Structure formats: C-alpha cells, structure tokens
Image: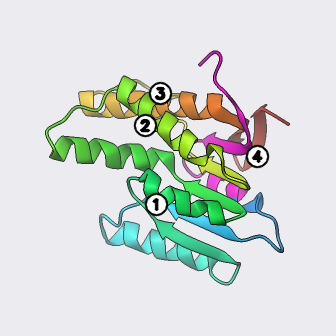
Amino acid sequence: MVGAISHPRITLVTGGSRSGKSSYALSLAPEKGASRLFIATCPPVDAEMEARIVRHREERRGKGWDTLELQLLPADAIKDAHAYDFVVVDCLSLWVNNLMYEAEKAGQALDEGRMAGLAGELLSAFAGHPGRVVFVTNEVGMGIIPDNAASRLYRDLIGRCNQVMAAGSGKVVLMTCGLPQILKGE
C-alpha cells in the first residue's frame, strides 16, 4: 500500500470480536449539532442475529442517528451519505461476508485482487466526504489458520480489505479489551 493517499477525515477501527469497536466508533461522533448516519451491513440471517440488530438499533434510538442498511454498500447509495456530518460504517467484515455470498450465488470467484479493488472503490466513494467517516472491521488474522478453504479465503479477503482501508485512512485504531490503541494518525 506504499504511496496510498490517506484521507484525514477517514478513521478505521479494528480489533477482535467484542473488543469495543462499535462503541468506540459511536463515541467519536460529535455530541451536538451534527447529523449522524449509521450504515449497517449485517443481514438478518436468523432470529439471534435479528435480535442483535434490534438491540443495536435501540442503542442508537433517540441519540440523533439515522440508520441505513446496506449489505453490499453500493456506491450510488453511499453518495447520499455526503449529506451527513458524521458517518459510521459497521462493519466491513460483514460486508466481505456478504460479497463472498453474492459471488458464490452468482458462480463467481472473489479473490484478493478484486477485494482490494472493491475496498479502493469504497474509500473513493467517501474520499470527498465533507465530514468524518469511521469504518469498523474485525481483525481476524491473529488466530490459527482456518481448517477449510472458505474460511481461509474469508480471512484473506478481510485482511486485504483492511490493508487497503488502513492505507487510505488518516487514522487507524486497534481496540483491545475496550481500550483504543492508535496505530496511525493522532
């Protein structure tokens, strides 16, 4: 990612599951006077996931957040986010999962090169955003090597996505046990 352009108003928040990523991302929003958009990528695939989605909606209710559910993050829908002062996209890991699922349904392959291109397109869609944008993602490459090809591909695609997003973000934060560690930026 040498030579990648960093966008100072874009932040990437990464970390393990339940490390505090989403809460931290939401905490970065201005408390008053800003229009805020939460872009959710999670599909309601079962009753437990639907309950999680409802719980997360409730956490934002009454706090000035609009919610847009975009499982595949189409660039034409993202341009509407430019009307907001602060945008959180949560999360890229589910976006990668959704892309893998759609590619499989269409009988197509999603490889690291295509993933890097899609992540670059996502950054470009937000590069001219007049406010702040925070992307949330999971760091999945710190564990054991998965025992099957689909899981290894998923890990590799998220890793590639995260590298592109980190290179293009002005700030990168790693969450561990609810504590932010600044990896890039101030």
Q: Residue at x 33, y 45 (%)?
A: 99
Alpha-carbon distance for marks 2 and 1?
15 Å
Q: Earlier in the sequence, mark 4 or mark 2?
A: 2
Q: Earlier in the sequence, mark 3 or mark 4?
A: 3
Q: Earlier in the sequence, mark 2 or mark 1?
A: 1
| Residue bearing mark 4 | 179
The answer to whether residue 67 is left or right of residue 2 is left
The relative height of residue 173 versus residue 25 in the rendered view (above or below) is: above
Q: Residue furthest left?
A: 107
Alpha-carbon distance for marks 3 and 4?
24 Å
The mark closer to the camera, 3 or 4, is: 3
Q: Is residue 34 magenta?
A: no
> How busy is the neighbourhood of tag 1: few (under 14 within 10 Å), some, or many (20 plus)?
few
Please tell me the numbered disc located at residue 118.
2
The relative height of residue 31 versus residue 125 in the rendered view (above or below) is: below
Q: Residue at x 73, y 63 (%)?
A: 85
The type of colouring in the image is: rainbow
Q: Earlier in the sequence, mark 3 or mark 1?
A: 1
Alpha-carbon distance for marks 4 and 1?
33 Å
Please tell me the numbered disc located at residue 160.
3
Q: Mark 4 near mark 2, Cβ–Cβ under 8 Å?
A: no
- Dot 1 falls on a residue whose secondary structure is helix
The mark closer to the camera, 2 or 1, is: 1
Please tell me the numbered disc located at residue 136.
none
